């Protein structure tokens, strides 16, 4: 028996076996859940994501292209889920994007309009867009979780426009929770500590951030993918039936420290 037995949901954001989404799927699968997956359009991205998913032990995975910057692409993907599976129990949103040229110390104030709006679109608005498409499929209620970071609350050197977008993501979480609660759909975010992913390595000075967190966090270590994956599985499961509208910190306690 696992806390996700009988639950089927969509996991968006696996790029490889170091992605937070990958670890979340791993925990969900271990707890008895079924995962559906999307990948960015293109054969190269499909091969990469398929390889990562198969490393989870999923044979012949449900895997479909979806470009979150396209309403039409999201419509096609969610329509396919509805026609092929009927319902959803959970949604994992683990995508974000900002032009890495502007994720460097001293480059926030000059962020161009198009860089700012793209970061907000992909990193925050898409959670609302996917929730809007997933909610009608959650006829018996469900859970949603997105990935945030401490840079949404405090200024982190080099995180820049992504921090602003993550702040919007956390606000989106609260407003979605307010509107979807009457449908018994719970909406939360996880503020995970830094790990080495394709996205995080675009942030200038990332290695120094890892060193600093290891020194200052109460647990004296950096967070692991499993730490976050297990927390997400709990949030999406009936074990967290009274939790919604929250940003849960999974960062070895770093966010609780004053210095």
Image (cartoon, helix red, strand yellow):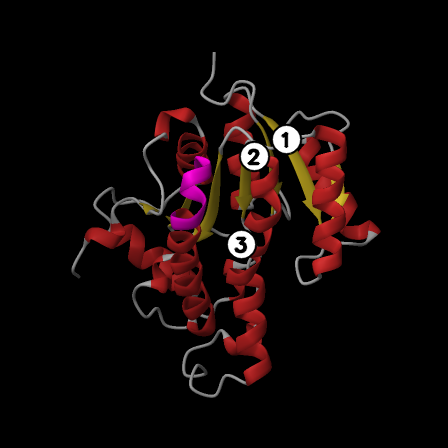
Disc nearer the start of the sequence (2/3)? 3
Compared to residue 234, the image places residue 45 above or below, namely: below
Quarter-of-image position of residue 106: bottom left
**Relative to 8, residue 232 above or below:** below
Q: Is residue 190 visible?
A: no
Q: Which residue is mark 2?
A: 138
Mark sitting earlier along the chain (1/3): 1
Q: Is residue 34 left or right of residue 78?
A: left
Between discs 1 and 2, the one toward the N terminus: 1
176 or 110, which lies in front?
A: 176
Give the label, 2 or 3, closer to the camera.
2
Q: Nearer the viewer, residue 76 or 54?
A: 76
> Which portion, as a residue range, is magenta?
178-185
Helix, strand or loop status at disc 3: helix
Q: Give the percent coordinates (x, y) of residue 251.
A: 32, 47
**Mark 2 and mark 3: span between their CA atoms?**
16 Å
Q: Magenta residues: mostly which secondary structure?
A: helix
Residue under label 3: 127
Residue at the far left in the pictured view: 258
Q: Which residue is farthest right?
A: 43
> Which secondary structure lies at badge 2?
loop
């Amino acid at each position: 028996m696992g806390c996700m037995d009988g639950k089927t949901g969509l996991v968006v954001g696996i790029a490889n076996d170091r992605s937070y989404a990958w670890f979340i799927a791993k925990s969900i699968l271990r707890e008895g859940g079924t995962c559906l997956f999307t990948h960015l359009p293109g054969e190269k991205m499909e091969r990469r994501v398929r390889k990562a998913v198969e490393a989870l032990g999923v044979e012949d995975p449900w895997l479909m292209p979806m470009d979150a910057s396209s309403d039409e692409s999201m419509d096609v993907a969610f329509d396919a889920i509805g026609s092929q599976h009927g319902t959803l129990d959970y949604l994992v949103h683990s995508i974000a994007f900002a032009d890495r040229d502007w994720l460097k110390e001293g480059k926030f104030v000059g962020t161009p309009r198009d860089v700012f709006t793209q970061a907000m679109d992909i990193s925050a608005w898409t959670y609302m867009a996917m929730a809007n498409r997933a909610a009608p499929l959650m006829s018996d209620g469900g859970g949603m979780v997105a990935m945030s970071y401490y840079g949404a609350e405090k200024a982190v050197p080099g995180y820049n426009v992504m921090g602003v977008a993550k702040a919007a993501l956390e606000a989106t979480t609260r407003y979605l929770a307010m509107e979807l609660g009457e449908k018994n759909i719970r909406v939360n975010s996880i503020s995970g500590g830094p790990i080495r992913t394709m996205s995080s390595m675009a942030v200038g000075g990332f290695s120094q951030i890892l060193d600093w967190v290891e020194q200052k966090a109460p647990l004296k270590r950096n967070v692991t993918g499993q730490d976050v994956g297990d927390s997400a599985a709990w949030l999406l499961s009936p074990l967290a039936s009274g939790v919604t509208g929250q940003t849960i910190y999974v960062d070895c306690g770093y966010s609780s420290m004053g210095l």
